[in-house]
Image: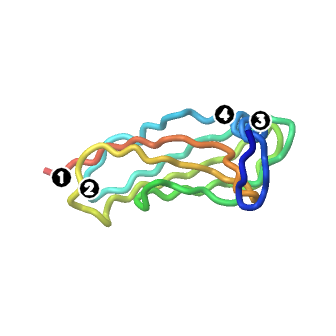
Amino acid sequence: MLYLITNHIVTQRHLLAAQESFCVPPHIELGSITSHEKIKYTLKLFNNSNRSYFISHVVTSCHCLEAVVHPSLIKAHNNASLELTFDPSEDPDFVGKLSITVTAFDVNSLVLFQTCADVIVFKKQ
């Protein structure tokens, strides 16, 4: 099967090879917070492949979660950090559980890894 991603044709095998290069858990538990708090979480990434990857951008499925990778260039068999900051202040009335998808892309917009960050927001008593 072929995929057309931003004018680049890649095979499913290529996509899977890039995604399997990183040791990333499928779910991250951020914990429970009140609707007026922020929570920060650092996920350690490891590139277990024999090539370097440049992470051009990280996208989250909710604007309440910011994700930044340091460094952006992850050399073969090296570590990096994914810094997550959850801030529910734009919707202070929200309470409940959120599962937010976090996806990292290379310069050709190929998915390098994806995970889901789970958090529970409750009202301050």
Determine which of the numbered discs, if any, sits on residue 13 in the image.
3
State whether residue 71 appears in this view: no
Work out how far the residue at label 1 is from the one at label 2, CA to CA, in angstroms.
7 Å
Work out how far the residue at label 3 is from the one at label 4, CA to CA, in angstroms.
18 Å
Tell me residue 109's x, y (percent): 70, 56
**Label 3 with label 4: CB-CB less than 8 Å:** no
Tell me residue 39's x, y (percent): 40, 51
Work out how far the residue at label 2 is from the one at label 4, CA to CA, in angstroms.
31 Å
Which residue is label 4 attached to? 23
Which residue is label 2 attached to? 35
State whether residue 117 appears in this view: yes
| SS type, badge 4 | loop
Left or right relative to 8: residue 80: left
Amino acid under disc 2: Ser
Disc number lying in front (2 or 3): 3
The residue furthest right is: 50
Amino acid under disc 4: Cys
**Label 1 with label 2: CB-CB less than 8 Å:** yes
Amino acid under disc 1: Lys
| SS type, badge 1 | loop
Q: Is residue 35 above or below residue 100?
A: below
